[in-house]
Every structure is written in structure tokens, then in C-alpha cells.
Image: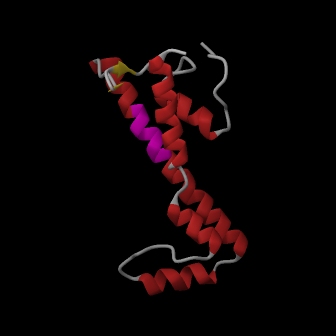
């Protein structure tokens, strides 16, 4: 397999490994959620939620994190496409995409469960 493709896949898999939002996970598990200034107020609010409502809010938090990563990747794509930005690791250039879209499109697919496999180009 092409070294650039291998590095690209490793980069995207690293994002997936760090995808879980700690706040969302802690809320689901009933653990301390935010190291905030008014921590008591937030703790009281979280404790007042039903289990289902905690899951809903945790899902919203997780989606927000996924969207933030998507936005950063979209910004990288824009700079790759419009300003000739190149991403390299150990002197090997990343391809712009694995499946023929862009970083942010590949990210969305991976978040929805697409697996690496055959190149979809």
C-alpha cells in the first residue's frame, strides 16, 4: 500500500481514537462533568436529569465535538484546495482523501461506521 495512504489512514484513525468527548462520557456514567467555575450548579443540574436526558445531552455534546473536528478538517481541505497546503509526515505527503472526497468527507464516513477497505475513488 502507498506510504501516503498508510499515514493518512493512521492520522484519521488517531482522530477516531480521540473522538469520544470526555464530558459526554462522564455525563453518561454519572461522573463529574465540568471543571467549571460554578461546579455545584452544574452538578445539581446534571443530578436532576433522568438517565435518558443525560444520554440525550451527552449525545449533543458528542455531536458538537464531531462537528468541531469536521470543521477543522474542512478548513484544512479548503487550504489544500485553494492555497496548496501540503500535509506531510516524515517527508511523505498525505493524499487529500482516501475515498475521493476530502478529509472532512472521509471523517463523516468514518464517524458513520465506514471502514477502510477498497478505495472508493
Q: Residue at x 31, y 21 (%)?
A: 91
Closest to the observer: 14 or 28? 14
Q: Residue at x 67, y 23 (%)?
A: 117
Q: Is residue 51 above or below residue 108?
A: below
Asked if the stretch drawn in magenta spans residue 73, the answer is yes
- Residue 79: quarter of image: top left
Q: Is residue 23 left or right of residue 39?
A: right
Q: Is residue 86 left or right of residue 5?
A: left
Start and end of the magenta stretch?
67-74
Q: Residue at x 66, y 38 (%)?
A: 112
Quadrant location, the C terminus:
top right
- Residue 84: quarter of image: top left
Question: How many marks do you count on the picture?
Answer: 0
Asked if the stretch drawn in magenta spans residue 3, the answer is no
Q: Is residue 50 above or below residue 5?
A: below
The secondary structure making up most of the magenta span is: helix
Whole-percent x and y of residue 110?
Answer: 61, 35
Quadrant location, the N terminus:
top right
Whole-percent x and y of residue 3?
Answer: 46, 19
Whole-percent x and y of residue 92?
Answer: 36, 20
Q: Residue furthest right?
A: 52
Q: Residue furthest left?
A: 83
Whole-percent x and y of residue 93?
Answer: 37, 19
- Tell me how the rendering is colored: secondary structure
Q: Is residue 83 left or right of residue 3?
A: left
Amino acid at each position: 500500500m502507498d506510504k501516503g495512504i498508510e499515514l493518512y489512514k493512521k492520522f484519521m484513525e488517531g482522530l477516531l481514537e480521540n473522538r469520544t468527548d470526555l464530558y459526554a462520557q462522564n455525563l453518561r456514567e454519572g461522573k463529574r462533568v465540568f471543571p467549571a467555575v460554578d461546579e455545584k450548579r452544574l452538578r445539581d443540574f446534571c443530578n436532576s436529569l433522568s438517565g435518558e436526558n443525560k444520554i440525550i445531552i451527552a449525545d449533543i455534546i458528542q455531536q458538537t465535538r464531531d462537528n468541531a473536528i469536521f470543521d477543522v478538517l474542512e478548513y484544512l481541505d479548503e487550504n489544500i484546495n485553494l492555497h496548496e497546503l501540503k500535509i506531510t509526515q516524515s517527508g511523505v505527503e498525505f493524499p487529500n482523501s482516501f475515498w475521493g472526497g476530502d478529509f472532512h468527507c472521509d471523517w463523516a464516513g468514518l464517524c458513520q461506521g465506514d471502514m477502510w477497505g477498497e478505495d472508493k475513488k
